[in-house]
Image: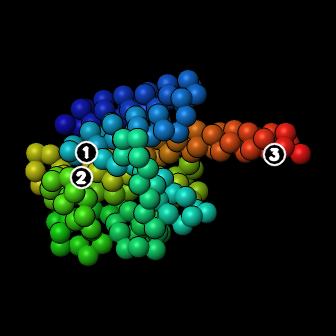
Amino acid sequence: MLQARLREASALIRVLQESAAAGEGTNALLGALTEHIYKVVDGDKGTVFMVDAKANALWSRKGEATARTDLDKPSIPATVTKTGSSVSVADVYSDDRFSPDEDKKSGYKTTSLLCAPMRASSDGPVIGVVQVVNKQPGGYFDEEDDEMLTLVLEMVGPIVGGVVSEMAARDEKAKARAESEVD
């Protein structure tokens, strides 16, 4: 089982490095992360939330749409963002921070989850949160899962942070260029 997890982690890191090197941008990188991260801890699916400090919110991509969550609204990803510590919940419906709204909309039944912070550097602020749901084949996420996800995010965080910073710098340059053309 450990070997399979390490293979998944290695494949994930390779895909992210290739995406970053190709300059594919934040959406492609986060899409690749979302598609692979849950496999590292035997989850059913995962979500990557990125921190928007200016808006005091988390955002995630759902297909072509962007979903936003206010950091002041109680939620497990907001708790992880604020504390910088991971959270594992064996029965999400018994946790007041869990909102069943998405389950009701989609018909999906979330039972357990593991949510962990992502940083661009080990002593840096939280730049994102990864949430993995429904341990497979049933059960809940344990301490070993938490350690594995945390370790992988320590390797992935700098890649994501670098791409996010690069894209923000490009946007700033384009904005400055557009403003100078108007003047």
The circle on residue 73 is none
Spatial CA span between label 3 and label 2: 44 Å
Q: Residues within 10 Å of mark 2 (few under 14, many from 20)?
A: many
Name the residue that disc number 3 marks. 179
x, y percent for residue 70:
46, 67
Q: Is residue 52 above or below residue 56?
A: above
Name the residue that disc number 2 marks. 133
Q: Amino acid at mark 3?
A: Glu
- In front here: 17 or 56? 56
Q: Earlier in the sequence, mark 3 or mark 1?
A: 1
Name the residue that disc number 1 marks. 45
Res 168 → quadrant: top right
Query: Can residue 123 be seen from the camera position used here?
Result: no
x, y percent for residue 77:
38, 62
Query: Can residue 58 be seen from the camera position used here?
Result: yes
Spatial CA span between label 3 and label 1: 42 Å
Q: Amino acid at mark 2?
A: Val
- In front here: 128 or 141? 128
- In front here: 17 or 98? 98
Q: How is the image coloured?
A: rainbow
Q: Earlier in the sequence, mark 1 or mark 2?
A: 1
Q: Is residue 103 above or below residue 64?
A: below
Q: Amino acid at mark 1?
A: Lys
x, y percent for residue 178:
78, 41
x, y percent for residue 63:
36, 41
